[in-house]
Amino acid sequence: MASVTKNYTVEGMTCAHCKASVEEEVGEINGVFDVEAHVEQGRVAVSGEGFTDDDVIEAIIEAGYSVKE
């Protein structure tokens, strides 16, 4: 399986703590190699293989934020 990078638009991130919370939750997903949250753009880039959009969305919600479709 090839590695992929997907971007998600996240609402509600406003600070470094927000960034850390999202990166920690998403980083725990099996198959995720790298997570980079960009607070200014309201985006999260997720790299890895074998993870699903639902996995990432659920983790972002668990961190306390919402994903804009």
Image (cartoon, rainbow, N blue to C red):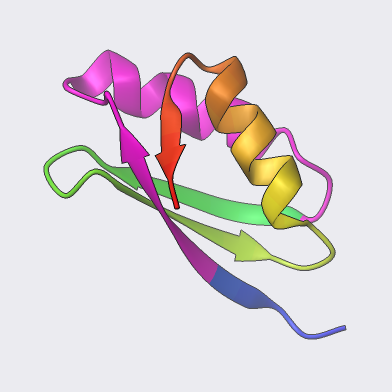
The span picked out in magenta is 6-31
Which quadrant of the structure image shows residue 57?
A: top right
Query: Relative to 25, does residue 46 appear above or below in the rendering?
Result: below
Residue at x 42%, y 22% (from the top left corner): 65
Farthest residue, direction left: 40
Which residue is at 45% across, 39% downward?
A: 67
Image-quadrant location for residue 21: top left
Left or right: 42 in relation to 22: left
Q: Residue at x 44, y 29 (%)?
A: 66
> Residue 55: x and y, percent?
74, 43
Residue 39 in picture, x, y percent from top left = 20, 37
Residue 2 in the figure: left or right of residue 45: right
Q: On the rendered image, what quadrant is the N terminus found in?
A: bottom right
Where is residue 49 drawn, in percent x and y?
77, 68
Residue name at image x 32 percent, y 20 percent = 18
In the rendered view, does 26 fall on the left or right side of 55? Answer: left
Q: Is residue 62 magenta?
A: no
Residue 4 % position (x, y): 64, 77
Q: Quadrant of residue 2?
A: bottom right
